[in-house]
């Protein structure tokens, strides 16, 4: 009897172990696939799908509205509780005009959009030739109330010709609408004729000031800070016949600051006095308070590798320590500045890309903390004292599968979640505890996920 009982006990223990293993594997699988409470991200709603397009889209989340900008329309979707991505309003440019630019921010719930007709453009993304006649270029700026799509004001914009020059000429922040006006064809043939920055009241469109861009400089990017308006300028000698830059060594990229209240130029200094950045470099503003520029000297589109640096400046234009785009931490892919810190995603390559999340001290240029991620990162965002990172299975994946949450102070991991349904890999925003992901053209404009 004793041996029989012992055998039964052993059998029961064995069965218990097997069941425990099966339970553990099942729990791991359910957690990994997003089917356990406390470990999951579930989809709550998605907007209607976009029309197919070969052109890039712009996306914003402002208050309780998500906005999608395309070449043919700007559309607002409600994201408050109960609205579930409902289409609220839409602006379609008149006639054959196309949307050709927008402000990267929608401050105070006001979005700036520019539209016009391009000379020699193709029509509507269909590949058909544009109608005959010279286009007027990106010549009209409109301000919208994001909440209801109501037009607040519109102004004409001076352009040098009928070509679309891309974004970088509109800014909306701190109660100001900032517009970069180019020179007209006649002004372009006048040596020393300056382009200008014009500031208007963001809500009313009332003119505040006009600032001449110094010398033979072209505005590459601009940003309204708390006390100064910052601009990246490509400066040098110009050829009066074609209004283009010469190939001399005296052509370089500078950082400029204008008084926010009057538009007076306060300073204009080279981005890097020791190793000047030429006009074939790519330089844009990461942050205005403090001023931090991302300056790329060269890039390899095939490998994704870049050379350059993040360069910071004091309020008086004095440069601070720089942070190289590549170092022992790898190649920085994206960054976000919050106060005196810069947070960055960096990657190294060994049988695929491996990512790290890093915090830098802008005062010293040194690392504060450095965390290796288990999976490739698709993007990140800093909000308050928390950092949200979205990850994918691999660098070749077209969808994100995981959410990681970190403490911005010390880099400690606070939470890990798995998406039950794969999310589109694109820009994302946080709104009332939800993750709002902007999808690609032809897909859902926005998809909302929440913790479960």
Image (cartoon, rainbow, N blue to C red):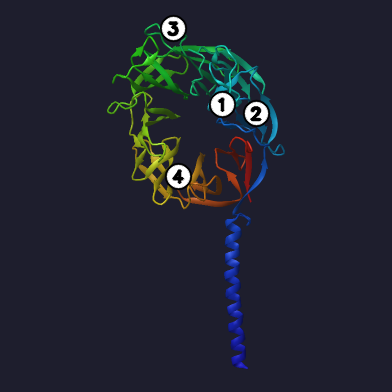
Camera-near label (3 vs 2) is 3
- Residue at x-position 63% and y-position 44%: 449
Residue 305 horizontal/vertical position (percent): 38, 39
* Label 3 Cα crowd, 10 Å radius (few <14 / some 14-19 / many 20+): some
Question: Which dot marks residue 187?
Answer: 3
Check disc 1 and report the residue beneath it.
107
Q: How far apart are the alpha carbons under marks 4 and 1?
A: 27 Å
- Mark 4 vs mark 2: which is more N-terminal? 2
Q: How far apart are the alpha carbons under marks 3 and 2?
A: 37 Å
Check disc 2 and report the residue beneath it.
75
Does the CB distance between marks 1 and 2 fall below 8 Å?
no
Callout 3: helix, strand or loop?
helix
**Nearest the eye: 263 or 326:** 326
Q: For residue 429, which quarter of the picture?
A: top right
Q: How far apart are the alpha carbons under marks 1 and 2?
A: 17 Å
Check disc 4 and report the residue beneath it.
409
Residue at the far right: name it.
Answer: 82
- Mark 4 vs mark 1: which is more N-terminal? 1
* Vertical placement of residue 334 versus 247, above or below: below
Residue at the far bottom: name it.
Answer: 1
Callout 4: helix, strand or loop?
loop
- Mark 1 vs mark 2: which is more N-terminal? 2
Q: How far apart are the alpha carbons under marks 1 and 3?
A: 33 Å
**Nearest the eye: 79 or 246:** 246
* Label 2 Cα crowd, 10 Å radius (few <14 / some 14-19 / many 20+): many
- Residue at x-position 65% and y-position 28%: 75
């Amino acid at each position: 009897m004793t041996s029989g009982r012992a055998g039964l006990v052993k059998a029961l223990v064995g069965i218990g172990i097997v069941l425990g293993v099966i339970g553990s594997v099942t729990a791991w699988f359910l957690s990994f696939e997003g089917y356990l409470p406390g470990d999951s991200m579930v989809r709550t709603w998605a907007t209607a799908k976009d029309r197919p397009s070969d052109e890039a889209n712009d996306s914003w989340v402002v208050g309780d509205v998500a906005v999608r900008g395309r070449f043919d329309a700007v559309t607002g979707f409600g994201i408050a509780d109960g609205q579930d991505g409902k289409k609220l309003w839409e602006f379609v440019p008149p006639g054959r005009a196309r949307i050709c630019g927008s402000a990267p921010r929608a401050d105070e719930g006001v979005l700036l959009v520019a539209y016009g007709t391009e000379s020699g453009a193709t029509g509507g993304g269909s590949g058909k030739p544009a109608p005959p006649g010279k286009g007027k270029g990106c010549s009209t700026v409109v301000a919208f109330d994001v909440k209801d799509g109501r037009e607040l004001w519109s102004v004409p914009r001076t352009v040098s010709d009928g070509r679309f020059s891309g974004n970088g000429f509109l800014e909306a922040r701190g109660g100001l609408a900032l517009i970069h006006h180019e020179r007209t064809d006649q002004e372009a043939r006048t040596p020393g004729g300056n382009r200008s920055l014009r500031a208007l009241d963001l809500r009313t469109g009332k003119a505040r000031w006009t600032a001449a861009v110094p010398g033979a400089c072209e505005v590459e990017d601009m940003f309204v800070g708390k006390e100064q308006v910052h601009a990246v300028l490509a400066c040098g000698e110009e050829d009066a016949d074609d209004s283009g830059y010469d190939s001399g060594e005296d052509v370089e990229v500078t950082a400029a600051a204008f008084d926010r209240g009057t538009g007076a130029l306060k300073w204009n200094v080279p981005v890097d006095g020791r190793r000047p950045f030429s006009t074939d470099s790519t330089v844009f503003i990461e942050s205005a308070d403090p001023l931090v520029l991302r300056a790329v000297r060269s890039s390899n589109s095939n490998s994704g590798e870049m050379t350059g640096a993040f360069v910071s400046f004091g309020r008086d234009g004095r440069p601070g320590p720089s942070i190289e785009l590549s170092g022992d931490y790898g190649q920085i892919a994206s960054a976000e500045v919050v106060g005196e810190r810069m947070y960055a995603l960096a990657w190294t390559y060994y049988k695929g890309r491996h990512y790290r999340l890093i915090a830098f001290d802008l005062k010293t240029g040194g690392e504060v903390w450095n965390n290796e991620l288990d999976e490739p990162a698709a993007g990140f965002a800093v909000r308050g004292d928390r950092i949200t990172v979205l990850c994918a299975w691999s660098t070749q994946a077209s969808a994100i599968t995981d959410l990681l949450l970190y403490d911005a102070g010390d880099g400690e991991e606070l939470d890990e979640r798995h998406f039950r349904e794969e999310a589109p890999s694109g820009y994302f925003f946080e709104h009332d505890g939800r993750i709002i992901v902007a999808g690609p053209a032809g897909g859902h404009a926005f998809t909302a996920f929440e913790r479960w």
